[in-house]
Image: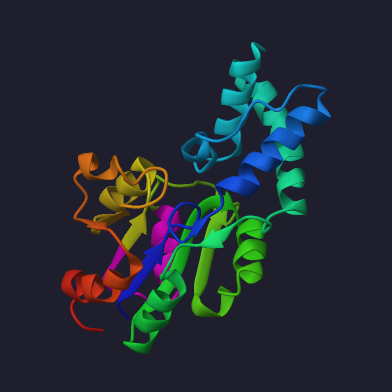
């Protein structure tokens, strides 16, 4: 079955507000002033460790990667408490996935968000039934840009020809490593820079995705 595989954060949904809130709550729990805010959305979508690194740097606190790893579980716990307060699907995302499925495409998610949090989020956003598989951090021993999680997502839905749609260089490198087309979204915090990565296509709006899928993979 021809398959479209989606990244989650920054691709299907803008989750930056809840991610930043979780990071700031983590710093507050350490007795530190919240260091992150407007303008940091792109860093938020790179994940919890990236936010911790930036926050400590802004506060003038020197930490190593072992200390970042030590604070990461506290950030995840804060995030789980408020995972869908501000998060929202990008305009047209749900309709695009529904249209793809109606046209015979399989849809899956491949994310570096921990699997249990990704499952919680897409359930809260009301889109879990639209995806035949979700592979996240912890599903395998490796994460993107290693192609194994992507290939596992495709295999889980019985996929044949496929492509990955994401929002970062990590997604682009994953697609290249898997030998499939790379589609990057031209909206969200990273939208202005993705064309420089030379993906196979830049998606400007989800309304265009079903026809793009047919162009890249052929009709389902």
Residue in the image at 26% along x and 49% along y? 176
Observer able to see residue 100: yes
Residue in the image at 63% along x and 55% along y? 86
Provide residue 167's location: percent of width, then percent of height.
37, 49
Observer able to see residue 158: no
Q: Is residue 207 left or right of residue 25?
A: left
Residue in the image at 39% along x and 44% along y? 145
Residue in the image at 22% along x and 45% along y? 195
Display coloring: rainbow
Q: Please determine whether, in this image, residue 142 is positioned above or below residue 100.
A: above
Quadrant containing the C terminus is bottom left
Provide residue 105's location: percent of width, then percent of height.
34, 81
Provide residue 140's location: percent of width, then percent of height.
54, 53
Quadrant containing the N terminus is bottom left
Name the foreground residue: 42 vs 149. Answer: 42
Q: Is 151 one of the magenta-colored residues? A: yes
Q: Which residues are magenta?
A: 148-163
Q: Please determine whether, in this image, residue 25 is positioned above or below residue 180.
A: above
Q: Is 101 one of the magenta-colored residues? A: no
């Amino acid at each position: 079955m021809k398959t479209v595989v989606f990244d989650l954060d920054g691709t299907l949904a803008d989750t930056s507000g809840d991610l930043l809130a979780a990071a700031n709550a983590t710093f507050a729990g350490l007795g530190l002033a919240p260091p992150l805010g407007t303008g940091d959305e792109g860093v938020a979508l790179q994940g919890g460790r990236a936010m911790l690194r930036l926050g400590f740097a802004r506060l003038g606190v020197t930490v190593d990667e072992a200390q970042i790893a030590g604070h990461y579980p506290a950030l995840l716990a804060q995030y789980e408490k408020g995972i869908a307060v501000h998060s929202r699907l990008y305009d047209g995302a749900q309709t695009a996935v529904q249209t793809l499925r109606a046209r015979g495409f399989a849809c899956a998610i491949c994310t570096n968000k921990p699997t249990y949090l990704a499952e919680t989020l897409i359930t809260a956003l009301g889109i879990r039934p639209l995806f035949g598989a979700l592979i996240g951090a912890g599903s395998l021993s490796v994460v993107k840009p290693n192609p194994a999680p992507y290939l596992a997502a495709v295999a889980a839905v019985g996929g044949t020809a496929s492509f990955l749609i994401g929002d970062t260089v990590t997604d682009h490198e994953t697609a290249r490593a898997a030998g499939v087309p790379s589609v990057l979204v031209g909206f969200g915090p990273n939208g202005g820079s993705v064309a420089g990565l030379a993906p196979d296509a830049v998606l400007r709006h989800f309304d265009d995705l079903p026809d793009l899928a047919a162009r890249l993979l052929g009709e389902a």
